[in-house]
Amino acid sequence: MTTRREFVCTAAAAVALPGLSAGASPDAKPLAEIPADKSIRVGALVFPRMDQIDLTGPFAVLSRLPNATVKLLWKSTEPVRDYRGLGLIPDAKMSDAGEVDLLVVPGGPGQEDLMEDEAVLKFIADRAAKAACVFSVCTGALVCGAAGLLKGRKATTHWASVQFLKYFGAAAVDKRVVVDGKLVSAAGLTAGIDGALQVAALLRGEVAAKAIQLDIQYAPEPPFDCGHPDKAPPEIVAKQRAAFRPLTDKRLATAKRVAAKLGIQVKD
Amino acid sequence: MTTRREFVCTAAAAVALPGLSAGASPDAKPLAEIPADKSIRVGALVFPRMDQIDLTGPFAVLSRLPNATVKLLWKSTEPVRDYRGLGLIPDAKMSDAGEVDLLVVPGGPGQEDLMEDEAVLKFIADRAAKAACVFSVCTGALVCGAAGLLKGRKATTHWASVQFLKYFGAAAVDKRVVVDGKLVSAAGLTAGIDGALQVAALLRGEVAAKAIQLDIQYAPEPPFDCGHPDKAPPEIVAKQRAAFRPLTDKRLATAKRVAAKLGIQVKD
């Protein structure tokens, strides 16, 4: 696990949040292992224009958890397409889903709409309140933020969107996986695999997590050392950042509206 | 990239294959970059009881290739469930799919049936003949083998199934990704991400592949060093190997039938 520096955070941790402190939040209690004989109900949000690997990476891990079920949840059970066109089938409607022990919130461009979708935000807040663990992947963290889950918390998200975490009252941490109480956040896309293995270890113990890592042969060998903007060639970082710009410009406006709604003051 | 030892191979490379030598195979010519202005048509097989991450990992990479389309292909366009229950939607029927430039063959328990499914094997052999690249992930290599693509070639597959490669005339190589001419094979499940990035680099150049790796933030940090049987604790390897046993026992019988059909003599 990296020990990368924390991002300079101009707001978040320094902001006094009305009626909330990290210590007072019921979410701040540490994650505890769930007894082996107790089933783990995993509910994973899917939605149009999500990034499928934010979900399918963790699915490969979490669907192998002993004594667990994983359900994909959305507003309907009609197929959804990820923003690169992959078709996925929700297993159940959010409105039909009961409590979950582990709530998974993936990201991708489609999360933009979710940040102001009251039905989705209510679902996330409701299920998160009773879940043992909430696990966001990529820009799924921003949806959790819009649902009010990140106030006074540490979190991470995709490298091109870390600057938005402060609008939800969160302290951005430049780590691949951040665990803060029962809130686990993974950085961009493929970080969901690392995050899910950590969640597996936290909820079912290290032996179970190691067995899963062996099963999915997760001994990665990336062909290049450029999976983080600190490592990639500067010209490639600049080009990809520019490619994200239309999305991130729109996201800034959304984040500001959400911050106002949540009563979070951010110094730009 | 690892330089792990090659598996001891009692057959494969040593076997004289009727009418075939590595040099004579049209597939043995090296992979060449495809000009940027030429679209890359990616056809990826999906099937019931596949392992979804064998497909969705590479999809995250290949769907980001500049000037490329990715289509999921199967016998019908009805949804298929992976063997852990994830629902995926094929984009087109194999019978309706034209030529492809890149053929992706994932694996998973469902590949067992494909190894003796003449329609699927014919589809793979036909499309492979005209494709610039054939990319197998996990036990997808065994399906490619049953289609006759591995005779006299080097390949890899999931660690629990490497012993079957010889039945298809292949030399098993204990590497995460093996490139042999236009045939690229990745080891188990998550190795598909590493393999797809290598395929991306080979077909569209390193700059394009690096940009994709940055986009998908692929700077992995597995929580444990146990993604390969050489590294995992022996008791976990033994337990997982035993869990695979019913599957691998059945696979041995299938592999022997396929070897007989292909005219490949294997010393057990």
Image (cartoon, coloured by chain):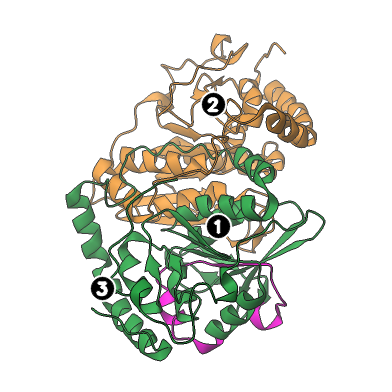
Chain colours: A green, B orange
Q: Identify the residue shown where x is 59% and y is 13%.
A: B8
Q: Identify the residue shown where x is 61% and y is 33%.
A: B142
Q: Identify the residue shown where x is 78% and y is 53%.
A: A36
Chain of the residue under label 1 = A
Q: How many marks?
A: 3
Where is residue B158? Give x, y as percent: 60, 34
Q: Amino acid at mark 2?
A: Leu
For label 1, the residue is A56
In the visual, does B68 lie left or right of B74?
left
Where is residue B112? Give x, y as percent: 71, 39
- Front position among marks 3 and 2: 3
Element under label 3? helix
Give above or below for A173 relative to B164: below
Whether callout 1 and callout 2 share a subunit is answered no
Boundaries of the magenta span: A93-119
Crowd around label 3: few <14 · some 14–19 · many ≥20 (10 Å):
few
Circle number at residue A246: 3
Q: Identify the residue shown where x is 46% and y is 35%.
A: B129
Circle number at residue B150: 2
Q: Determine if the magenta segment contains residue A104.
A: yes
Q: CA distance from mark 1 to mark 2?
A: 29 Å
Crowd around label 1: few <14 · some 14–19 · many ≥20 (10 Å):
many
Circle number at residue B88: none
Work out which quarter of the rendered image holds the N terminus of chain B and state it.
top left
Return the residue found at the far front: A23
In the visual, does A222 lie left or right of A230?
right
Chain of the residue under label 3 = A
Q: Amino acid at mark 3?
A: Pro
In front: A16, or A60? A16
Mark 3 touches mark 2? (CB < 8 Å): no
